[in-house]
Image (cartoon, grey):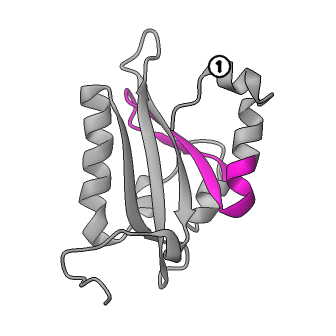
Amino acid sequence: MEITAEEMQYFGLIERDLIEIFSTFTPIGLWRIDLDSGHKFCCRSYCKLFGLTYTPGPVNMIELTSHIHPEDLSNVMASQEAASVQRMSYQKVHRATADGINYRYICSIGRFREKPGTSGEIIGVAYEVPPHRCEFRYETETPSA
């Protein structure tokens, strides 16, 4: 979805309105990866999605990746790598757990952003996808009849 500044003005919206609208129905979290350091920074609600303790500094990547389903981790990492190398945007649905037992579908949307004097950064949002809205299938899954 692409919303122009003119559309935002026409509907009388500010960025905060969009965040509030999206977060009304599903948990949403903001994140940023500094490409020079490799550090990932996350807001409180992002940490909550993954069952992580919020810290104002970078998150522990080993702990974060342990909450992503092992079958999905390489695809998530490949998307972030492609965004940084090709300076592009991506959207990835993957499974994640906050409690280490139950997996939910999470959609992560990220894009490369220039940052003067650096290699840039990837910024994005992540949100939980309600199971009834998810058409994500794995090769081992068969569509229900």
Q: Residue at x 52, y 32 (%)?
A: 2
Residue that badge 1 annotates:
5
Crowdedness of circle 1 by 10 Å Cα count: few (<14), some, many (20+)? few
Judged from this view, the residue extending furthest toward the bottom is: 145
Is 56 displayed left or right of 32 in the figure?
right
Farthest residue in the left direction? 139
The reply to whether the magenta stretch includes residue 29 is yes
Residue 104 point in image, percent of width and height: 49, 74
> In the visual, does 106 lie left or right of 79?
right
Q: Nearer the viewer, residue 86 or 134?
A: 134
What amino acid is found at the position of numbered circle 1 in the picture?
Answer: Ala
Dot 1 falls on a residue whose secondary structure is: helix
Q: Which residue lies at the image location 38% right of the left edge and 69% below the top edge? A: 135
Towards the viewer: 83 or 34: 83
**Vertical side of 15 occupied by 23: above or below:** below
Instruction: Identify which residue is drawn at 60% across, 41% down.
Output: 57
Residue at the extreme right of the image, as rendered: 12
The magenta span reads: 21-44
Q: Is residue 122 above or below residue 105?
A: above
Q: Position of residue 82 (x, y in %)?
A: 25, 37
x and y, in percent, of residue 124 in the image: 51, 40
Is 112 magenta? The answer is: no
